[in-house]
Amino acid sequence: MTKYVALLRGINVGGNNKISMKKLKVTFESLGFTDVITYINSGNIIFIDKTKGAEKLALKIERGIKKDFALAIKVLVRDTKNIQELCRKIPSQWTNDTEQRTDVLFLWDTLDTKSTIGLITTNPDVDTLKYISGAIVWNFERKNYSKSGMHKIIGTEVYKNQTARNVNTVRKLAGLMR
């Protein structure tokens, strides 16, 4: 049995793709997953399953969501080891607070490589990006948001092949998965 987190892309954002976390939990349980926990309304679901292979799980979850909610939602699945390793490699001083913003861009396999950083428009005076297997972590001071490349990522190939969470959420998920 392995503990996983499913990261759903683009649900409950701006009134679009609305999914109740309570109903989503029922969907996960109907798929045979156990110890299902949802965390905040942005599509983070922790669960246990005996299946090996995150890709197979993601497809199973996508089909379940399509059936129960009539929505085509992309899902990325990571196991506890991956999330713990990611959190260990994110600099501890990188936070998401009033002073700075740190986002974790979880990458689909097609872009899961360090060279993906080169596809992102950044301002080297403001943005710091770090590739960690499966993700790119993006940090900058909030006062520099207008100078950051963060607002330029929407619509790009990288944007379409990732799902983002702020670093506080990722650290909380790591704690819940222990």
Image: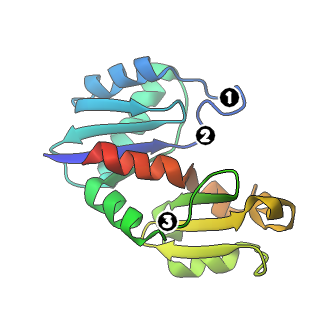
Residue located at (15% from left, 44% from top): 50
**Which disc, if any, is residue 16?**
1
Of the residues tagged 1 and 3, which is closer to the observer? Answer: 3
- Three-letter code for the amino acid on which mark 2 is drawn: Gly
- Give residue 10's position: percent from left, percent from top: 61, 40
Image mark count: 3
Q: Is residue 19 left or right of residue 50?
A: right
- Three-letter code for the amino acid on which mark 1 is drawn: Asn
Q: Nearer the viewer, residue 177 or 77?
A: 177
How many other residues sit within 10 Å of disc 3, few (<14), some (14-19) or many (≥20)? many
Q: Earlier in the sequence, mark 2 or mark 3?
A: 2
How far is mark 2 from mark 3, CA to CA?
A: 17 Å
Residue located at (68% from left, 75% from top): 119
How far is mark 1 from mark 3, CA to CA?
A: 25 Å
- Give residue 38's position: percent from left, percent from top: 39, 31
Residue wearing tag 3: 135
Q: Secondary structure at mark 1?
A: loop
Residue wearing tag 2: 10
How far is mark 1 from mark 2, CA to CA?
A: 8 Å
Residue located at (35% from left, 51% from top): 174
Q: Secondary structure at mark 3?
A: strand
